[in-house]
Image (cartoon, helix red, strand yellow):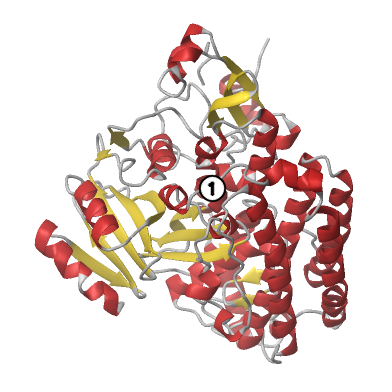
Amino acid sequence: MAQLEEVSIDQFKHLVSERAITGETMLLNMGPQHPSTHGVLRLLLELDGETIVNAIPDIGYLHTGIEKNMEAKTYLKAEVMSDRLDYMNNLGNNLVYCMAVEKLVDLDVPERALGLRVILTELERINSHLVWVGTFGLDLAAMSMFLYAFREREMILDIKELISGQRMMTTYFRPGGVWRDVPIEFEAAVRNFIKLFPKRIDEYEALLTKNPLFLDRLLGIGKLTPEVALQHGVTGPMLRASGVNWDLRKVRPYMGYDQYDFNVPVRTEGDTYARYIVRIEEMRESLKIVEQALNKLPLGPVRSDNRKFVPPPRSELGVSMEALIHHFKLWTEGFPAPDASVYQAVESPRGELGVLLAGDGGAKPRRCHWRTPSFDNLSVLPKIVKGHLVADLVAILASVDIVLGDIDR
Amino acid sequence: MDKKLETIIPALHENFNTNYEEFRGEVHVFVTAKNIISVLTLLRDKYDFELLSAMTAVDYWPQLSPRFHVIYQLTSLAKNLSLQLRVPLENGDPHIPTATRVYEVANWRERELRDMFGIIPDGHPDLRILLLPEGWEDKHPLRRDFPLGYEEVQFTFNFDEIDLRKPYAKE
């Protein structure tokens, strides 16, 4: 490892204006320990007074080599790494990874598992948006918002704890289905949440949506046009707030999303306020999906019975020799996948979450690339903060909804 | 294959002599590094592929020719289509022309490729290190011949021997 390098302005000559070279504007570091950077993001700002002339994001402080680590594990064991990428959307990451593995080895998933997956990923979407709306309020000095949002998030974490014993990194979805069936208390817990939550969203809206201080900070700030958004690969609520109706759950229905009746909220303003409205509406729509999925959740197995890929249930191990052999083979050697590659994408709370999974004919992936939405959404930041004040930068950055674990991988 | 792709694939073959593979309904078109920018521009302007969803590489080591595939995952919102382009690259000194002028999202993705695979995007406007630490030497962690890294286990009989070469701070 090289020694610490001395940084000079020459490195950034092509990114800052002429006036920074002459010393007329100021270069200022924001982060990586700044509380409103939502993790460890460093921004190098070029300021003219308090107006932002240029912003240069510097990422990589949370790079953990997850993609490399996954190459050294079997398909079943690599899944635990996926929870750790986007730590606000653990189940969504499990989902896309499992779907990629299922596509690669051509594995079917039973109906009940699909229903459970839909319920839980939509709850996870609400969970992620709750954390977002809480920290968004916090960044805009609406401190109480944070406490209310985390109160409801607690209910979702309790549901996750109920089904898996873990509150965040559950690894509950597995290739071929889910880990095991939900306990009997699950339905009541989810119904309780469905009953309570709409009123709570109304409360959040009463606090924020028409609050004049809130509106002053948001309206017309950080405008993003659809053309710039697509050029920068922006997806998810950010793209929909700019007037592009693109939601993978609607346009390429996976996991039976076509059976559910829900709307895709779209706004055309493209500013920070539009992104807020889109996310609030998305929470209501997700709740609709959860309710429908729970009402029609079929009974039956929750795991595929293809024993070449899915471990047998524990109860069979004592009575069946084949089950014991399969169990042993799957947990030591793993299953082989073809020497080919697939790309699977789903709509995560932040946008298109994709996995490019390449097998090499053996039990470990050759490559597992994560197309993470925060990475591309952040890359548009320098474009949308120009000309705004430093205080607006905080609002814009919060409205992008970045998760640094998702960016740095 | 999607019906809507059936006009695009022959057009690419005619103009750029590309071939394609199909796997689980996905179409992978193989393009040479020389043609990739023209193909991307054509797909964006004529066939409405507005979004470069993902861009990455796969290392096929120990196979050396071609060793890498650079992958462009394109999405068309207007037609609801996906298409994957693959650029095979040889071992040694892999270069691709930069796609930042066609899709700006390629800017960071190509910097990541340089960090992780040592694939150099020619003509890139801002080729600084992105994810790895500043001053990282010329090693590329996502290449298959880069070791994952581990700590050697010390036993009583070889404790001192391993201790000598162990990389931690000494007085």
Q: How many marks?
A: 1
In the image, residue A9 sits, relative to residue A113, either above or below, namely above
**Circle 1 residue:** A377
- Name which quarter of the figure residue A367 lies in: bottom left
Res. A124 visible in picture: no
Q: Position of residue A276 (x, y in %)?
A: 69, 54
Q: Position of residue A72 (x, y in %)?
A: 51, 52
Q: Quadrant of the C terminus of chain A?
A: top right
- Name which quarter of the figure residue B142 lies in: top left
Residue plotted at (50% across, 42% down): A380
Q: Secondary structure at mark 1?
A: helix
The amino acid at mark 1 is: Asn
Check the residue under mark 1 and report the chain it is in: A
Q: Position of residue A23 (x, y in %)?
A: 53, 8
Q: Position of residue B131 (x, y in %)?
A: 51, 35
Q: Is residue B96 left or right of residue A190?
A: left
